[in-house]
Image: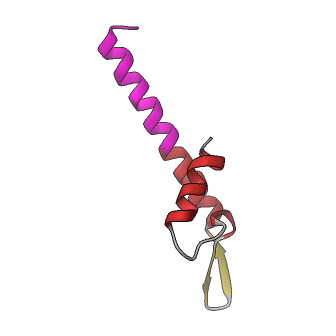
Amino acid sequence: MVTDLIMAFIDLGLPGIDNLPTLKIPVDNQEFEVGGFLVALITFIIVAFVIFILVKVTKKWGIK
């Protein structure tokens, strides 16, 4: 879900980034491939947020 839906909206929202997983940043004679890391970081944050919300809701309802 994160890769197919949410990352598609992020690609639309950030002009100039057509495909985030292949993003490379050139520094002198080297290229740092940071796209894969950014995708993994965004996916982690979204999944962690969903788990956080689920825990909050279950505690509010009294589910153990």
Query: Which picture quadrant has residue 25?
Result: bottom right
Please name the residue shown 47% across and 38% down the image.
Answer: 48
Please name the residue shown 67% across and 90% down the image.
Answer: 29
Query: Which picture quadrant has residue 52?
Result: top left
Quadrant into which the C terminus falls: top left
Q: Nearer the viewer, residue 11 or 51?
A: 11
As drawn, 55 above or below 18: above
**Left or right of 22, for residue 39:** left
- Where are the magenta residues, as a range? 46-64
Quadrant into which the N terminus falls: top right
Q: Main secondary structure of the magenta part?
A: helix
Whole-percent x and y of residue 44? Answer: 53, 45
Q: Nearer the viewer, residue 25 or 4?
A: 4
Whole-percent x and y of residue 20? Answer: 63, 65
As drawn, 55 above or below 27: above
As drawn, 61 above or below 45: above
Q: Is residue 62 within the magenta segment?
A: yes
Q: How is the image coloured?
A: secondary structure
Query: Which picture quadrant has residue 22?
Result: bottom right
As drawn, 18 above or below 62: below
**Left or right of 7, for residue 50:** left
